[in-house]
Amino acid sequence: DQQVKQNSPSLSVQEGRISILNCDYTNSMFDYFLWYKKYPAEGPTFLISISSIKDKNEDGRFTVFLNKSAKHLSLHIVPSQPGDSAVYFCAASPFGNEKLTFGTGTRLTIIP
Amino acid sequence: DTAVSQTPKYLVTQMGNDKSIKCEQNLGHDTMYWYKQDSKKFLKIMFSYNNKELIINETVPNRFSPKSPDKAHLNLHINSLELGDSAVYFCASSHGTAGGHNEQFFGPGTRLTVL
């Protein structure tokens, strides 16, 4: 039973345009959400997070949006750069719980 | 200046052998984790230790035994290796859930291949 889903296994975006990665969750106990970026042969790198008391969090080119009623979050990258090509994982946890549940990832390719 | 390090990076071994993977973090974190990424790229937590105490133990065969000699180290020992144990194993660390936040920082992974 996959509680965090990333339904798009891959996404290609032109350099300079906006990349939008989506994530859905089913567990209503989740209230903290994170995005990780992963290059081949490396570990996941933390990008940005959001707690359920917010609906938006921004850090430079990265913005995460949370729609609690739809149990949906998205990561916007603008403008997209070639170095953004990687696999992106969303993850979620209940408040005060160390256990992160990860999605299956979306491979983002930025086309020069 | 590595934050979370794992050794070895690659491990190739025969079925039935016993092997260990080591993990160290220099971030001053209290909590450490082991994750398994299987062939479908699904990243799933196995164990978590906080200050050397086990706090998460997912449904993992008891052939897998984590050991935390101190809060900067969390090693994973695997007995009687099976073909299905082939995967990439990631170590991670965090400050735990202080304030409700739990950003975890990952090591580079250990690719285990069982022949």
Image (cartoon, coloured by chain):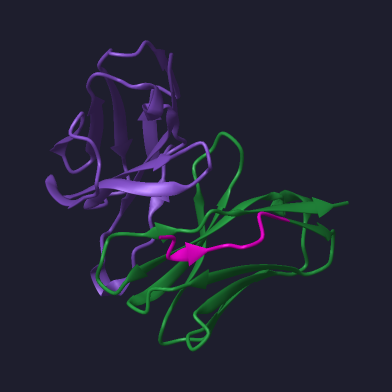
Chain colours: A green, B purple
Residue B15: x and y, percent? 34, 13
The quadrant where residue A81 appears: bottom right
In the figure, A42 relative to A51: above or below?
Answer: above
Label the magenta part by its dominant secondary structure. loop
In the figure, B11 relative to B97: above or below?
Answer: above
- Give the residue at x 31% y 33%: B23
Residue A48: x and y, percent? 52, 66
- Give the residue at x 42% y 65%: A3
Residue B93: x and y, percent? 32, 49
Left or right, A41 with respect to A3, comes to right
- Quadrant in which the C terminus of chain B appears: top left
The quadrant where residue B99 appears: bottom left
Magenta segment boundaries in residue numbering: A1-10
Report if residue B86 lies within the magenta region.
Answer: no
Specify whether residue A14 is in view: yes
- Give the residue at x 26% y 52%: B29
Residue B48: x and y, percent? 23, 49
The quadrant where residue B52 appears: top left
